[in-house]
Image (cartoon, helix red, strand yellow):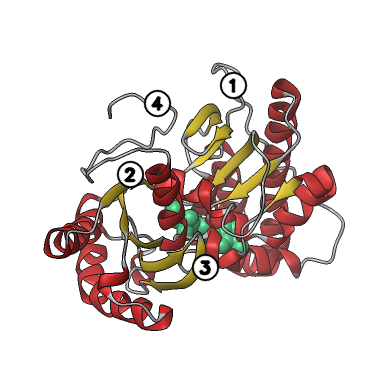
């Protein structure tokens, strides 16, 4: 079965081809146009997707040695995401579907991120999935493909958003996750700034709060001169990242304890972070799984995989846009 995945929910345009669940091609274009604005500008994102999607589509077919006639299923991200950006991928997919009568299925982007870990790993169900990206920080109990229980989520900023906002304060360009990680690595001292790990007492579940941490970094930086900020950057980045890792470990340990599940998958852009990956491996050993970094950030291979699994279990959903990120209501009409 040959599946084409199409992703355009934010600032990556991506087209992938899978054959029997294996990646033949996974073309990704990351828009650089947002760097100057310190964050994604929705209008620019839509325009850039339009410029790139056709070329990526052709390149993906070429690399896979496939033609349009070989395609058995189109899987396209239809939620959540920037409306104008999603429309580009959805309209392109509907065009293909109509012209060539290829079956089509809409895919939730978060379900795609969770499926990404199964592209190249055999992860036994049930497992705990930590989705940490620019837009989301959530923990799910994954019973099977298509069956998710939400165990916790951020009540304010997402983990990646905290990285990006702290990065902006420290003068890194958007997105700042990778730069903060690199800068933190260059710190060779032992002292740490005691930034707070978010406590979320009022909400049930294993929730995150990164906004207090972000503000603490802001107040700390405000007390310093620009020169001092520059010198202290490695210490600030290291201390910030240590607080993020503490929050992640605390919630994951509690989620495992509560559910009795040992297997953990970390997915989403922040899961590229090598220091965080190592911390999870140190804490959970062989029962932790990650996608390769290129499959952690937004890509269409993960959408194709989630679409394939949904199709195989008999789900049929014509793409239609919904602003929801909820994937824990499967089986109900949405
Ligand atoms: O999954 P993704 O590509 O897009 C969303 O669905 O949001 O994630 C992008 C996020 C950005 O916030 C970026 O700063 C973060 O992932 N990120 C990282 C690293 N690489 C990317 N955060 C921390 N460490 C990294 N190495
Ligand atoms: Zn994403």
Tag 3 secondary structure: loop
Q: Is residue 55 above or below residue 230?
A: below
Q: Dividing the picture into quarters, in which one does residue 322 lie?
A: top left
Task: Give the number of the mark in front: 3 or 1.
Answer: 1
Which of the two discs, 2 and 4, labels the residue nearer the N terminus?
2
Which of the two discs, 1 and 4, labels the residue nearer the N terminus?
1
Measured from the top left, where is residue 323 in percent x and y?
27, 38
Task: Give the number of the mark in front: 1 or 4.
Answer: 4
Task: Report the disc number at residue 80.
Answer: 2
> How busy is the neighbourhood of tag 3: few (under 14 within 10 Å), some, or many (20 plus)?
some
Tag 4 secondary structure: loop
Residue where numbered disc 3 is placed = 172
267 on left or right of 306: right
The reply to whether discs 1 and 2 touch (Cβ–Cβ < 8 Å) is no
Q: Is residue 133 above or below residue 4?
A: above
Q: Is residue 194 above or below residue 273?
A: above
Tag 1 secondary structure: loop
Which of the two discs, 3 and 1, labels the residue nearer the N terminus?
3
Residue where numbered disc 1 is placed = 205
Task: Give the number of the mark in front: 1 or 2.
Answer: 2
Task: Report the disc number at residue 329.
Answer: 4
Which of the two discs, 1 and 2, labels the residue nearer the N terminus?
2
Beta carbon at label 4 within 8 Å of ligand 2 = no
92 on left or right of 333: left
The reply to whether discs 1 and 4 touch (Cβ–Cβ < 8 Å) is no
Measure the C-alpha gap from mark 4 to mark 3. 38 Å
Measure the C-alpha gap from mark 2 to mark 4. 15 Å
Measured from the top left, where is residue 146 in percent x and y?
46, 36
Task: Give the number of the mark in front: 2 or 4.
Answer: 4
175 on left or right of 5: right
Quarter of the picture containing the C terminus is top left
Residue in the foreground of this view, choosing between 292 and 278: 292
């Amino acid at each position: 079965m040959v599946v084409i995945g199409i992703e355009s929910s934010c600032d990556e345009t991506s087209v992938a081809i899978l054959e029997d669940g294996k990646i033949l091609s996974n073309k990704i274009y990351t828009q650089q146009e947002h760097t100057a604005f310190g964050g994604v500008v929705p209008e620019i994102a839509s325009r850039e997707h339009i410029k790139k999607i056709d070329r990526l589509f052709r390149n993906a077919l070429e690399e896979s040695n496939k033609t349009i006639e070989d395609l058995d299923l189109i899987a396209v991200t239809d939620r959540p995401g920037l409306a104008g950006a999603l429309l580009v991928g959805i309209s392109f997919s509907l065009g293909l579907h109509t012209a060539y009568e290829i079956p089509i299925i809409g895919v939730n982007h978060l379900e795609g991120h969770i499926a990404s870990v199964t592209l190249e790993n055999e992860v036994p169900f049930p497992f705990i999935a930590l989705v940490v990206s620019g837009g989301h920080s959530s923990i799910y109990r994954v019973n099977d493909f298509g069956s998710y229980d939400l165990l916790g989520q951020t009540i304010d900023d997402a983990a990646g958003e905290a990285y990006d906002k702290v990065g902006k304060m420290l003068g890194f360009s958007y997105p700042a996750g990778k730069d903060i990680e690199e800068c933190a690595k260059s710190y060779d001292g032992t002292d740490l700034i005691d930034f707070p790990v978010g406590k979320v007492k009022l909400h049930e579940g294993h929730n995150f709060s990164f906004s207090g941490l972000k503000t603490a970094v802001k107040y700390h930086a405000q007390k310093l001169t620009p020169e001092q900020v520059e010198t202290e950057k490695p210490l600030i980045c290291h201390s910030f990242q240590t607080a993020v890792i503490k929050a992640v470990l605390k919630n994951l340990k509690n989620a495992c304890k509560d559910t009795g599940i040992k297997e953990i998958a970390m997915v989403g852009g922040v899961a590229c972070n090598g220091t965080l990956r190592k911390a999870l491996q140190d804490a959970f050993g062989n029962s932790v799984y990650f996608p390769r970094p290129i499959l952690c950030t937004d890509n269409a291979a993960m959408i194709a995989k989630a679409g394939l699994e949904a199709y195989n279990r008999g789900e049929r959903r014509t793409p239609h846009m919904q602003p929801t990120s909820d994937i824990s209501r499967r089986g109900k009409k949405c």
